[in-house]
Image (cartoon, rainbow, N blue to C red):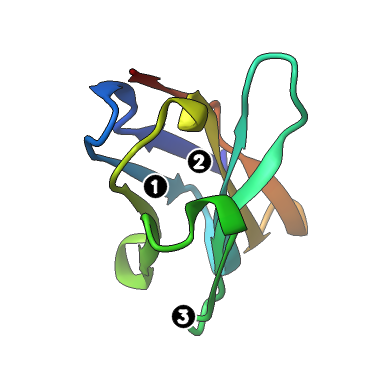
């Protein structure tokens, strides 16, 4: 079974830092883009950051200069380093990946989500 498992969420004060991790497991031939999305209560899910298999990154304007996405291809893992967190960063953060697997070919996969809460 192919799955994405996130970790690293929690409660932090404004100005603090957190690091999210997401590991892809299962019979995976290759992983294309990996990224992080977030969804705050009453709002739509939005892209936070994405990284291609070649290392090209893209960020939402709201997190540029504060968040850094990276990946370890050998470990099928993507990270999101979040610095200078603000209360408006509070949301459930979801890992996303486009993967080529033996089960479904090329398809989208989502993690279960991890809560990030930033107190003022």
Mark 3 → mark 2, Cα distance in angstroms? 19 Å
Q: How far apart are the alpha carbons under marks 1 and 2? A: 6 Å
Furthest-bottom residue in this view: 54
Of marks 1 and 2, which one's residue comes earlier in the chain?
Answer: 2
Near mark 3 (Cα within 10 A), the count class, few <14, some 14-19 or many ≥20, is some
* Residue placed most toward the observer, 2 or 110: 110
Which mark sits nearer the N-terminus, 1 or 3?
A: 1
Quarter occupied by residue 116: top left
- Give the CA distance from mark 1 to mark 3: 17 Å
Residue 4, labelled with which disc? 2
Residue at screen point 74% across, 15% down: 42
Coordinates of residue 44 in the picture (x, y in percent): 77, 30
Bin the neighbour count of mark 1 within 10 Å (Cα to Cα): few under 14, some 14-19, many 20 and up: some
Label pair 1/2, CB-CB below 8 angstroms: yes
Residue 1 in percent (x, y) is at 57, 38
Left or right: where 90 falls relative to 14: right
Can the viewer see residue 101? Answer: no
**In the rendered image, the vertical position of residue 31 relative to residue 40, given as above or below:** below
Residue 100: percent from left, percent from top: 66, 64
Q: Nearer the viewer, mark 1 or mark 3?
A: 3
Which disc is residue 23 wearing? 1
């Amino acid at each position: 079974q192919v799955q994405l498992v996130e970790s690293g969420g929690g409660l932090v004060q404004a100005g603090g830092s957190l690091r999210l991790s997401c590991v892809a497991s299962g019979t995976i031939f290759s992983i294309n883009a990996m990224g992080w999305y977030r969804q705050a209560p009453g709002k739509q899910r939005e892209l936070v950051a994405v990284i291609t298999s070649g290392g090209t990154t893209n960020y939402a304007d709201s997190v540029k200069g504060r968040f850094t996405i990276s990946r370890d291809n050998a470990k099928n893992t993507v990270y999101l380093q979040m610095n200078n967190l603000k209360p408006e960063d509070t949301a459930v953060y979801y890992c996303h990946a486009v993967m080529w697997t033996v089960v479904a070919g090329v398809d989208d996969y989502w993690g279960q989500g991890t809560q990030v809460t930033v107190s003022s």
